Image: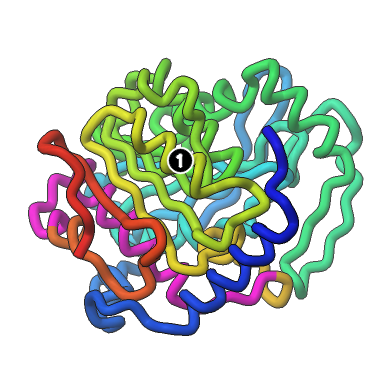
Amino acid sequence: MKLLPLKIVVILVLFQFLLVSFPSVTASENNLIYNEVQKQEINQINISFESGKFTLYGEIYYPTNVSEKYPGIVFCEGDGGYVSAYSWIPKALAEAGYVALIFDFPGQGKSEGILPAWALNIPWLNFYLRYSFLIETPLHYALRRLTAATSDALTFLIEESPVKNIVDNSSIGLIGHSLGGITVTETAINDERVDAIVALSQGNSRIIHKVNVPIQFQGGCFDIGTWSIPIVIQCYKKANTPKELIAIQGGTHFGFSTALGPLCPCPRWQKDICLRYSIGWFDYYLKNKSDAYEIITTGTDHLSRFVKSRYNFGDGDIILQ
């Protein structure tokens, strides 16, 4: 794939800053934070589980009310990622009534890998750089260990974890960012337990037509370096229905998906949009909540005006208004 000429990149950058500078004319920003008044108290536990010959580190977030059953969701991190960079999303899912497991891929974060886990750790910046990931992650991906680890994480959640008794095994979702977005689309092809997917920033457009569960794509229109928007648009076009594309105005690769603190300053609404439509998607397809339909089919402030957000539930594309 050829790189974009520098002049075009500069024009796109300036264009996106202009888009960010002017609010869109959709719904009120008061509607951005989904289920804000319905947040549940949650607990968090650290866990580890086996995947192949590696012991993987993870965390589970779940509602404190353990007298009920909740849908289970597994979150997959991006290339070089680590749990604390993304944990705000599983926390929000738990507050919305889900049991959410997030884990480090083999050779990433605190999980075992082939090489020693030497890393640069700056806690006050929430920054953790494992030096070997540039070598390990491509290798593990090529050997299909990431999809295997995702299925193993799901098995652990519903069969072995300390909270297995409150997980509704018939209602399972996957969500992932970047490489994790690719991984969740690939995992869903072979793991029949998966009932709904949210892919942030990326997906595997070569095989997306084989995914047969409801899938939502989210992309940031300022995510130029990873070709996020062209990739998620291509994935959306090839995906089976029901499907949705959420394009975030001025969204960066990490701005709407990670919690990197001072390293990744971004408007709060990027994360609000991510949660609004992610939780809405899972509420509609995992919890069968009829009122979630309005959430996922209605536009809000700061959706891109350059790339139209849309959905297709079987009757053709409909633009979010």
Q: Residues within 10 Å of mark 1 (few under 14, many from 20)?
A: many
Is residue 47 shown to the viewer in this render?
Answer: no
Q: Residue at x 55, y 24 (%)?
A: 147
Magenta span contains residue 222: no
Name the one closer to the observer, 230 or 197: 230
Q: Which residues are magenta?
A: 264-293
Q: Quadrant of the N terminus?
A: top right
Q: Position of residue 110 (x, y in %)?
A: 75, 44
Query: Quarter of the image holding residue 10?
Result: bottom right
Q: Quadrant of the C terminus?
A: bottom left
Q: Residue at x 69, y 16 (%)?
A: 143
Q: Residue at x 38, y 73 (%)?
A: 302
Left/right placement of residue 263 relative to residue 304 reads right
Q: Quadrant of residue 72?
A: top left
Reading the image, the residue beneath label 1 is: 74
Q: Could you say whether the residue bearing mark 1 is in a helix, strand or loop?
A: strand
Left or right of residue 210: residue 298: left
Q: x, y percentage for residue 253? A: 60, 57
**Whether residue 171 can be seen here:** yes
For image coordinates 39% across by 32% down, the residue present is 158
Q: Is residue 78 above or below residue 115?
A: below
Three-letter amino acid code at the position of disc 1: Val
Give the image quarter of residue 77.
top right
Where residue 11 sits in the image (x, y, percent)?
A: 62, 66
Q: Main secondary structure of the magenta part?
A: helix
